[in-house]
Every structure is written in structure tokens, then in C-alpha cells.
Amino acid sequence: MPPALSRHAITGLVLAGGRGQRMGGRDKGLQSFAGRPLAAHVIERLRPQVSALIISANRNGDAYAALGAPVVSDETQDFAGPLAGMLAGLRAARTDYVLTVPCDAPYLPQDLATRLAGALIDAVHTIGGDATPPLAAYAATAHGPHPVFALLHRSLADDLAATLAAGEHRVRAWLARHKAVQVHFGDERPFYNVNTLDDLHTDTPRAP
């Protein structure tokens, strides 16, 4: 790992490949929120933090591509969850690191990449010796972990593929196996998720 990890080493990945079950099967990232598709808000906050963007989506690819980023789909067609989207992004990325975020977090932290990258660098300096440095970090708040807000080294792709092939789909379990660094954020608001149709019309205070 380099002594500094800049945005030029990071590709942003918007995870928009879910079933949208809590929205009656609607494609969540394309639902209108404050006048724009939900995923457009996410992209707006993510783009300045990374050197390139990818959207993981399993339907409506043209509509997502119109938001200004290439679209990748899961290797399987069964809506296998966030880990499958992460794998598609890791395979497609041309940078060493991929920063993953969900498509339903319109207020995501504007310092997400900086904080997670800094934690990985600090961990390398802390462990020293011949210990294996961590290859992943993820966000957490006082309310709990937010594992889909994660920074992943693309060398994890093969292990992730094997994990999915073995039937494991839990993001936290996979991150824990790799001793991912948990990074605490003091403000819960940036991690607000728009989960239901009612949430699309909720007047939620905008995070800084």
C-alpha cells in the first residue's frame, strides 16, 4: 500500500442492483427524490472523492448510464445482494481501490474516501512487521456498522467470488474475515437511507 492514498487510486461504486423490495419492486436508485433520481444525489456527493465512477445495476442500464457513469451488472441474474455488486465493481475497476456506497444514501459523507483511506494507512503504520495489512475499511456510527460504505482493494475480487460461490452473502461476515478496519463517524445523518416510498417524501435534514 502506498504511503498516501489519494482519490486518483480510488474508483467510486454506486450499488443500485437490488430488488427494491421495500419499494414494491421499484428500481430504488431511479426514484425521484427532491426532483432528481436518488442515485443522482449519491453520484453528486461521491464524484469529487474519486477518480472514476461505476454504477452496479441489474436493470434499467440505459437510465443509469444517463447519470454519467458506466454500468456493470452482477455475474449472476438472481439479485444476489450487495456483495455481488461489489464483485462486479472490483472486476471492472482500473484503480487499486474501490469505494462502495448504496444508491439510497443521498447525504453520504463528503469525507468518506478520505476517512476510510486514512484508516487503512494508519493501520499499516500500526501493525508493522510482517503482519498482513488490511485491505478493506468500512464506516460505522454509534447506531452500528454501515458495511456497504466500504473501501476495498481490488485484489479481494477472487476471494469475494469464491465467497459468493460458497453461498455466503453477508457483507459484514466477509469484511470481518478480512479484518476490515471499522471507522467511526460521529454524525449519523450522512448515512440516512431512503428505504420506502414514504421516505422519498420525508423532509430529512440535509447532512453537512
Image (cartoon, grey):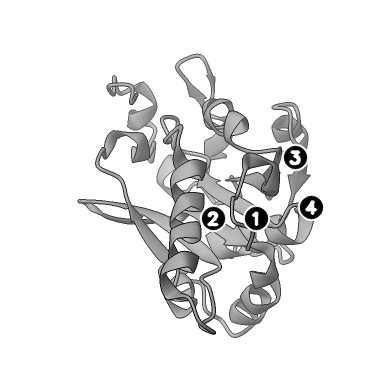
Q: Which mark is residue 151?
A: 2
Cα distance, mark 4 to mark 3?
A: 20 Å
The answer to whether 192 appears left or right of 155 in the picture is left
Q: Residue 35: x and y, percent?
A: 50, 14
Looking at the image, residue 194 lies above or below residue 201 = below
Q: Residue 154: x and y, percent?
A: 68, 63
Q: Nearer the viewer, mark 2 or mark 3?
A: 2
Q: What amino acid type is highlighted by mark number 3?
A: Gly
SS class, disc 3: helix
Upstream in the sequence, badge 2 or badge 3?
3
SS class, disc 1: strand
Looking at the image, residue 115 lies above or below residue 198 = below
Q: Which mark is residue 97?
A: 1
Q: Which mark is residue 61?
A: 3
Upstream in the sequence, badge 4 or badge 2?
4
Question: Callout 3 environment at 10 Å: few (<14), some (14 to 19), or many (20+)?
Answer: some
| Residues marked 2 and 3 touching at CB (< 8 Å) | no
Residue at image location 35% in from the left, 40% down from the top: 191
Q: Which mark is residue 94?
A: 4
Cα distance, mark 2 to mark 1?
A: 7 Å
Q: What amino acid type is highlighted by mark number 4?
A: Arg
Looking at the rendered image, the quarter that the C terminus falls into is top left
Q: In front here: 119 or 35?
A: 119
| Residues marked 2 and 1 touching at CB (< 8 Å) | yes
Q: Residue 184: x and y, percent?
A: 30, 52
Looking at the rendered image, the quarter that the N terminus falls into is bottom right
